[in-house]
Amino acid sequence: MKKHLALLIVIAALALVSAGCKTHEEGAYTPQNATQFDTENKANFVLMDPGAQRSVTCSGIQQTTSSDGRLQIAANVRNRENRRLQVQINCEFKDEQGFVVDTVPWQTLILTENGQETVRFESMNNQAKKYTIRVREAR
């Protein structure tokens, strides 16, 4: 009986050791859910948190190009609530492939009750072809 028990313990120990030493040899992995939560790569106007999503909207965006080729953006940002809001807004200018070439610093925007403000952004160089306007709650 003791011999069988000792034999079972040795077999179990060998099974654990051999299972722990296995390596994964299939090569590189592809990213999982690569298109999930990538709104900033697709949309021109994004809201960065639930508070901004509930309270702010964009009623229109105007895109023009200056004489020297720089991208100019004007966005009508609207307060959807009957209370004064303080948010932060910025713009990331991107090249044709979607890589950021210029970022405008976050600025504070105060929206009156149900009010609308036009916010303007201009890229620093003529490489910008796309953009993303980002809005978040001010902290």
Image (cartoon, grey):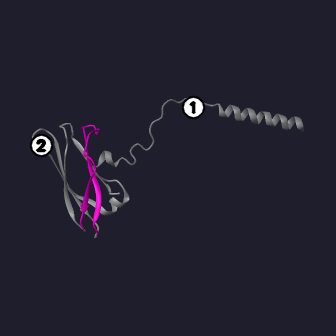
x, y percent for residue 49? 36, 56
Q: Relative to residue 126, is residue 56 depicted above or below?
A: below
- Circle 1 residues within 10 Å: few <14, some 14–19, many ≥20: few
- Front-most of 78 and 130? 78
Q: Which residues are magenta?
A: 83-112
Image quarter of the N terminus: top right
- Element at label 1: loop
The residue that mark 1 highlights is 24
Task: State how far apart marks 2 and 1 are (Cα).
Answer: 55 Å
Residue 21 image point, x, y percent: 65, 31
- Asked if the residue at tag 1 contacts the one at tag 2, i.e. Cβ–Cβ closer than 8 Å, the answer is no
Q: Which tag is nearer the camera, tag 2 or tag 1?
A: 2
Residue placed at 38% from the left, 45% from the top? Answer: 35
The image shows a total of numbered marks equal to: 2
Residue under the point 29% across and 63% down: 85
At label 1, the amino acid type is: His
Of callouts 2 and 1, the N-terminal one = 1
Q: Main secondary structure of the magenta part?
A: strand
Residue type marked 2: Ser
**Residue 67 point in image, percent of width and height:** 9, 40
Residue depicted at 89% across the width and 37% down the height: 2
Report the side of 52 relative to 122 (left or right): right
In reply to whether residue 99 is colored magenta, the answer given is yes
Task: In the rendered structure, find residue 66 and report the number of the disc placed on it.
Answer: 2
